[in-house]
């Protein structure tokens, strides 16, 4: 029947795509670099001498602040912008920072002030990463400076320490002088000490570097999937599309039958209320499988044409189809309930659209940001469908996740189906 | 034969929220009889017929009815996106009855004229030749020729041992009935 309403068909197919694009925009906004104010109360100099190395603190902060956009503001302006939400955090360089950095007697401190809310965790993590990167840079500078001192001790020569110029004999020079002296037990002990010291300090290089970075992370970039083709995006696209499709289809189909008066005719012994709901559930499941598999094939074709590393897991397509059917059925049961409660076709469609948006967004909220939202989302099929699709397509050992999410989807189908049946019984013809 | 009860309603009533649409009443349909229900708009005739047909549950009372009942509601109950032939085939399949032929145009029912939709509505009620026909203003929107055809068809049902109960606003049609029930402010009474 749907193909005879081409406008409705176009709207039904185009609407989820438009919303998906909007969600993509929201997601890209969420991924954009948040603005963080850098409040420099210590008036950072252009450069600081650490050892014999020139260290540009401000420039280094800018360079390592990859995940945030740093804007230099004075304290008052930063506080004002934080209150208005134009920036999400303040990173303060307090007075005495450079003195502590030069003195090496105590750790210099950076202060972070964030807003309360979901982004604060992310900002805190990003600033921790920034401080980690700064420490790495400083640590490297300190290690290099210390190694120069050790080289001076080993080889001798002219150097500078705490602003004083020194002419150092060095262990090599000491050994040469000792070799010119006649042998003797006391001189032999001094020679032995010089040799041991040379050996020990000769190994200092690697040891010092290892102490500064006990574990070093070596990062490399491969030619993996781009963000647009990632497993997560594919799963989101599937879950989002079938949520709209199945929920609207089932709700509109049931309410539409009442609008046309056929519900009364059907219920007079031709079709029981349970069968009426089951038919809508089956319709939603079939539509979800058809559309979902088509989307997965489209993704796969793009991935194959683009020769993207990893490729599309074609062998998992049957598992995906099972998940689409289960999720479609659960959404169909929920849609039937909405259709029976709304009672009229247009109202049912509107209610379904109004319902599906929060259901989807609840499922998108990360658990660590809002545990309550994540808990509520378990009562709706979207989150379970999403997890099923991700596991089916991309997890190496998906069975535990698949069984858990399948059980949830079957349970939700039965629960919403029973409620929808009850609502249909009470629905006037 | 006239004493064989095909449908029996006992103490049925219906409330919609705080409003009573139908006060408690009894109604029997016997084989070989035609019953007309008359009354002003909003008196409860359609509610009574819907309860007899099983399309609406009564608030009180019960209805004993045969498995197959032909029901033509006041507003045609059909799938607007399906053609008359498709509607007939679908409902025939659901009722496990042979599909009836239709001379109506082969286009979606929503695009038919009001009279054509009413004819399809009646054709759906007649699917499977049910012994009891419950018709809500069946001649509304029908031309004179079609009205006569309908009355002849209903007479055949009654002669064949069936029963017909119809709602009408046309007092001339009351003469077609063996009994006339007056529904007024939800109360049913027989002359």
Image (spheres, grey):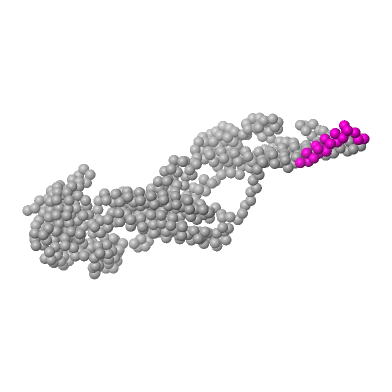
Which residue is rendered at x = 30% and y = 56% of the image? A275
Of A154 and A102, nearer the camera is: A154
| Residue A156, visible in the rendered structure | no
Q: Is residue A186 magenta?
A: yes
Of B24 and A211, nearer the camera is: A211
| Residue A70, image quadrant | top right
Of B51 and B104, nearer the camera is: B51
Residue A150, percent from left and from top: 78, 37
| Residue A327, visible in the rendered structure | yes
Which residue is rendered at x = 61% and y = 40% of the image? A130
Which residue is rendered at x = 56% and y = 54% of the image? A226
Residue B77, percent from left and from top: 25, 59
For the N terminus of chain A, the quadrant is bottom left
Residue A393, percent from left and from top: 50, 55
| Residue A285, image quadrant | bottom left
Q: Is residue A61 magenta?
A: no
Q: Which residues are magenta?
A: A182-203
């Amino acid at each position: 029947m749907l193909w005879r309403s081409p406008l409705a068909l176009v709207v039904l197919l185009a609407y989820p795509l438009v919303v998906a694009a909007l969600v993509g925009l929201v997601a890209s906004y969420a991924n954009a670099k948040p603005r963080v104010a850098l409040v420099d109360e210590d008036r950072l100099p252009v450069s600081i001498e650490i050892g014999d190395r020139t260290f540009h603190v401000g420039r280094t902060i800018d360079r390592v602040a990859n995940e945030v956009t740093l804007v230099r503001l004075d304290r008052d302006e930063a506080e004002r912008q934080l209150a208005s939400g134009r920036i999400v955090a303040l990173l303060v360089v307090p007075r005495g920072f450079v003195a502590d950095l030069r003195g090496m007697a105590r750790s210099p401190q950076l202060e972070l002030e964030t807003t309360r809310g979901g982004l604060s965790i992310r900002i805190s993590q990003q600033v921790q990463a920034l401080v980690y990167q700064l420490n790495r840079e400083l640590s490297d500078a300190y290690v290099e400076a210390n190694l120069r001192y050790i080289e001076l001790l080993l080889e001798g020569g002219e150097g500078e320490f705490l602003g004083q110029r020194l002419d150092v004999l060095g262990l090599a020079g000491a050994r040469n002088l000792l070799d010119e002296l006649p042998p003797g037990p006391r001189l032999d002990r001094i020679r032995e000490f010089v040799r041991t010291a040379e050996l020990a300090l000769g190994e200092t290089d690697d040891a010092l570097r290892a102490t500064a970075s006990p574990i070093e992370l070596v990062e490399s970039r491969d030619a993996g999937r781009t963000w647009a083709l990632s497993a997560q995006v594919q799963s989101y696209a599937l879950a989002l599309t079938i949520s709209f499709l199945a929920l609207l289809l089932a709700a509109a189909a049931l309410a539409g039958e009442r609008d046309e008066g056929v519900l009364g005719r059907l219920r007079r012994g031709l079709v029981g209320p349970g069968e009426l709901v089951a038919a809508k559930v089956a319709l939603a499941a079939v539509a979800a499988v058809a559309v979902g598999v088509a989307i997965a094939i489209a993704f796969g074709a793009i991935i194959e044409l683009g020769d993207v590393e990893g490729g599309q897991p074609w062998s998992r397509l049957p598992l995906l189809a099972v998940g689409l059917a289960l999720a479609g059925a659960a959404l169909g049961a929920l849609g039937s309930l909405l259709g029976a409660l709304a009672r009229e076709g247009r109202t049912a469609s509107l209610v379904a659209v109004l319902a599906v948006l929060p259901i989807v967004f609840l499922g998108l909220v990360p658990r660590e940001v809002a545990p309550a939202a994540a808990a509520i989302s378990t009562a709706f099929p979207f989150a379970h469908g999403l997890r099923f699709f991700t596991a089916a397509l991309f997890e190496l050992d998906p069975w535990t996740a698949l069984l858990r999410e399948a059980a949830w989807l079957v349970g939700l189908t039965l629960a919403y189906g029973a409620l929808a049946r009850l609502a249909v019984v009470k629905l006037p013809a | 034969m006239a004493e064989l009860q095909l449908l029996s309603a006992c103490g049925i009533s219906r409330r919609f929220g705080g409003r009573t649409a139908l006060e408690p009443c009894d109604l029997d349909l016997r084989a070989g009889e035609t019953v007309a229900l008359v009354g002003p708009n909003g008196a409860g005739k359609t509610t009574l017929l819907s309860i007899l047909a099983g399309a609406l549950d009564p608030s009180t009372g019960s209805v004993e009815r045969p498995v197959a009942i032909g029901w033509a509601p006041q507003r045609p109950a059909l799938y607007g996106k399906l053609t008359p032939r498709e509607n007939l085939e679908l409902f025939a399949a659901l009722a496990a009855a042979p599909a009836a032929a239709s001379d109506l145009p082969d286009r979606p029912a929503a695009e038919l004229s009001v009279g054509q939709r009413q004819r399809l509505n009646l054709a759906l009620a007649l699917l499977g030749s049910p012994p009891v026909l419950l018709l809500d203003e069946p001649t509304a929107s029908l031309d004179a020729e079609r009205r006569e055809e309908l009355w002849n068809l209903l007479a055949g049902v009654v002669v064949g041992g069936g029963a017909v109960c119809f709602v009408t606003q046309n007092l001339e049609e009351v003469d077609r009935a063996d009994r006339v029930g007056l529904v007024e402010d939800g109360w049913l009474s027989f002359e």
